[in-house]
Amino acid sequence: MSSTAPNPFDDGITLQPIANSSNITKQKADRRAERRRQEAVSRLVVDATRPPDFLLEETTIAAADKDRKVDEYSNLHALETIKLEAKLRSQQHSTLLLASTVASSIERGLDRELHTELLKQSKDAQRVISKICHDHSEDFLESVGKVVAALCGPCEEVKSSLNEVR
């Protein structure tokens, strides 16, 4: 047999080498790093979108309870002042939390991902609001029509005063 004869076992298929363990560990590490990055972004989004504490009445009263004596509640003005102070402290805290979240995202190099995720959530919220408005527009217009029908005279006065202003 000559050395130039074709090999009967050669079917023209080339086999790829089996991935060595370093490629597998690199892929695992890459997936783990991507997952950790996504988890970090989701935590930042939660911090950035956390509603301010001052929106909750109980929070302002609880904060006021810490700072003032109970006998000061006898004066309504004092209670309103306490609530306002608690609201301002809460607003400052919310502002600092947002600033810290943005600074942290910039430090970690996650600012683009945070921006992208916040935009996505904003668009989703807009879509939901638009759907709700669309779904309930007929009911709203019907109720407005009933009010106009019931208050025909006063509505005409409002319409004429608006026309005069224009």
Image (cartoon, grey):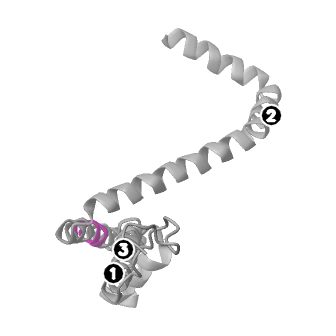
The residue depicted at 82 percent of the width and 26 percent of the height is 149
In this rendered view, identify the residue nearer to me: 103 or 15.
Answer: 15
Describe the element under mark 3 as helix, strand or loop. Answer: helix
Left or right of 133 on screen, residue 51: left
Query: Most extreme residue toward the left, as rendered?
Result: 107
Task: State yes or no: residue 163 in magenta.
Answer: no
| Dot 3 or dot 2, earlier in sequence | 3
First in sequence: mark 1 vs mark 2 = 1
Q: Earlier in the sequence, mark 3 or mark 1?
A: 1
What range of the chain is rendered magenta? 93-99
Q: Which residue is mark 3?
A: 34
Residue at image mark 2: 142
Q: Amino acid at mark 2?
A: Glu
Q: Do the CB atoms of the residues marked 3 and 1 lie less than 8 Å apart? A: no
The x and y percentages for residue 76 are 43, 71
Tell me which amino acid carries mark 3: Glu
Residue shown at the point (47%, 56%) measured from the top left = 121
What residue did someone put label 1 on?
23
